[in-house]
Image (tube, rainbow, N blue to C red):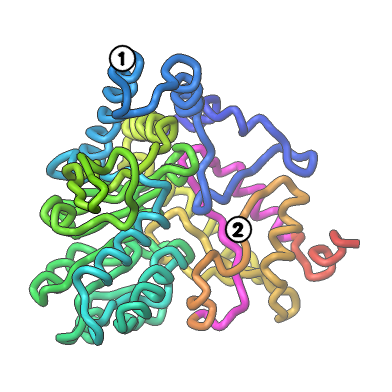
Amino acid sequence: MDTERIRKDFPILSRTMSDKPLVYLDNGATTLKPQPVIDAVVNYYTYLGANAHRGDYEMSAQVDAAYEGCRKKVADYLHATSSKEIIFNSGSSEGLNQVALMVCQQLLKPGDVILSDESEHASSILPWMQAAKQKGCKIEYIPLDEEGKITVENFKKAVHENVKVVCLAQVSNVLGFEAPVKEIAKIAHQNDMLVVVDGAQSTPHIDIDVQDLDVDFFVFSAHKMCGPTGVGVLYGKKALLDKLEPIYYGGESNARFNSCGDLILKETPLKYESGTQPIEGVLGLGAAIDYIQAIGKEAIHAYELELKSYFVQKVKELKTIHLYNENAQSGICTFNVFDQGQMIPAQDVASFLNTKGIAVRSGTHCAKMLVDVLKVSGTCRASFYFYNTKEEIDQLVAALQEATLENCINIFF
């Protein structure tokens, strides 16, 4: 990995934070944007500007071609059977809400069960909780093992005849463990269950083949893979998307309607894209895919694991750090800092690291059920990506050595 060359593509890495060179280790929350992605967004506003699928003039046709070209690019990126299985939206949260509402309202009946787990991000579990209430369905949870992982064995224990949907993250956003999605999907389909996967933390890092995984729905957000904010993707099997009705209605999604309420929707995927879509975001996502593909998913994942291993080695030398996910095969490192046996509040640690120019995440990371499993109020999370370096990890470890309770509290006085 030529990290030195890659870092030159990210203008923001030249900035400072707390008057220190920026060490950005919060990639699980959002990633930084390379110049080609920035250029793609600016190019749309500078030279294209028209709406998609609306105009009968040359500039609009150019937007159509670019927009639909990105749809094909996403389909190839996910190894989908067709670009017609790709729906653009505002991100993973919207995609998961769309699926939960459509499935609960149109396919489930009172008493049916949605199976999830206690490590899920709010966007993956709350839509099902709310949609289930409206329909009279229930939420049940796959037990996590002693490390906080989802296993096939525990999934089998949770399966029964009333389970109709399984929704889980392919990679946990807190502990970074990869769920055995392919094996779960096989068992689920043998029992007539739908499989919905949150790919927000997996899509930027590992190769995704939705056909091989055999998932029914899959979502991800552009901003976690070097793309713009406010745009994401919902993949769905074509037969299911054709069968379901959208939850949003408006311009572009319909072929015609009249004053009597007769409505004919356009074909999938356009029937799911009411209103003006985040066109510049879609084009930025296309540029992000090109950028990541040029580096290579295998190279990215291998480098992240190299950084993770380096960090684990370093913090093992410190007696003050408790690492919760040493064995996770991802670039997510979740930990807490102790001083004389007392845990320093995670937010205080993160604020102290900020004074060193280091950005990490702290708190519950939107997975508010997991703190009960871990039995802590919150954690710190350093999440690495391909533009991070071992030198930055050295800076993090050096700062953690200084992270005493007194030092972390005194920054506020």
Say which element carries label 2.
strand
Q: Quadrant of residue 303?
A: top left
Q: Earlier in the sequence, mark 2 or mark 1?
A: 1
Determine whether, in the image, residue 313 is placed left or right of residue 257: right
Horizontal and vertical percent position of residue 236: 21, 53
Q: Tell me which residue sits at (56%, 60%) in the image.
A: 381
Kindly identify the residue that appears in the image at 33 percent across and 20 percent down: 60
Q: CB atoms at circles 2 and 1 under 8 Å apart?
A: no
Crowding at label 1, few (<14), some or many (≥20) Cα neighbours within 10 Å? few
Q: How many marks on residues? A: 2
Give the farthest residue toward the front: 259
The amino acid marked with disc number 2 is Arg
10 Å crowding of disc 2: few (<14), some (14-19), many (20+): many
Q: Is residue 156 left or right of residue 50?
A: left
User: Residue sitting at 43 percent across and 72 percent down?
Assistant: 119
Q: Visible in this render: residue 148?
A: no
The residue at the far right in this view is 413
Q: Position of residue 211 (x, y in %)?
A: 14, 51
Q: Position of residue 368 (x, y in %)?
A: 52, 74
Q: In the figure, 80 relative to 186: above or below?
A: above
Quadrant of the image containing the N terminus: top left
Q: Which residue is mark 1?
A: 57
Distance CA(mark 2)–CA(mark 1)? 47 Å
Q: Of the residues tagged 2 and 1, which is closer to the observer?
A: 1
Above or below residue 292? Residue 315 is below
On the rendered image, what quadrant is the C terminus found in?
A: bottom right
In this view, the residue in front, 323 or 98, is: 98
Residue at image mark 2: 361
* Location of residue 401 with respect to 254 vertically, above or below: below
Answer whether residue 383 is magenta in the image.
yes
Which residues, given as a range, are shown in magenta?
374-401
Q: Within the magenta stretch, is there residue 342?
A: no
